[in-house]
Amino acid sequence: MELDMASPSVIVVQPQPTVANASSNMWQTGLMDCCSDCGVCLSGIFCFCCLQCQVASDMNECCLCGGSVAMRTLYRTKYGIPGSICSDFCTILCCHVCAVCQIKRDINKRKKRGIF
């Protein structure tokens, strides 16, 4: 009695996120672009925990994850923003507040454009 086992399929290409247009797959503001939204910048400086929770809430994630490397990587890959986990780690390590502020500014700008 011989069992006919189907060979497992091998995934060669991973699915990629679809992006609305070319400008939507870049950060909407620079890492140190605090003057583009002073409210977010002040929130990051004076109530960083609140800002992290806002970012996590916007992304439907746990409040404790708002300022993590995983959150930045998740956001970046969702919108096809170039980078790597290593670059996300270095960005968070060098300027944690600036990194979270950049995500929040990006979320705000994408919401205004209707692509969030």
Image: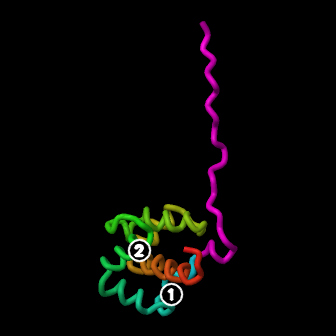
Q: Is residue 26 above or below residue 77?
A: below
Give me the residue at 66% from left, 44% from top. 12
The quarter of the picture where residue 1 lies is top right
The residue at the point 64 percent across, 35 percent down is: 9
**Which stretch is magenta?**
1-26
Mark 1, secondary structure of its residue: loop
Residue depicted at 57% across the width and 81% down the height: 28
The quadrant of the picture occupied by the C terminus is bottom right
Q: Main secondary structure of the magenta part?
A: loop
Estimate the spatial distance between the alpha carbons at disc 2 and disc 1, rounded to whole Å: 17 Å
Q: Is residue 74 above or below residue 100?
A: above
**Amino acid bearing label 2:** Val
Q: Is residue 15 above or below residue 34?
A: above
Please tell me whether residue 63 belongs to the stretch shown in magenta.
no
Tell me where residue 61 appears, x and y as whole percent: 39, 65
Q: Is residue 84 above or below residue 58?
A: above
Residue 33 — which label?
1
Amino acid bearing label 1? Asp
Query: Which mark sits nearer the N-terminus, 2 or 1?
Result: 1
The count of marks equals 2
Q: Which residue is mark 2?
A: 55
Is disc 2 placed on a helix, strand or loop? Answer: helix
Residue 27 picture location, percent across and down: 57, 77
Q: Residues within 10 Å of mark 1 (few under 14, many from 20)?
A: some
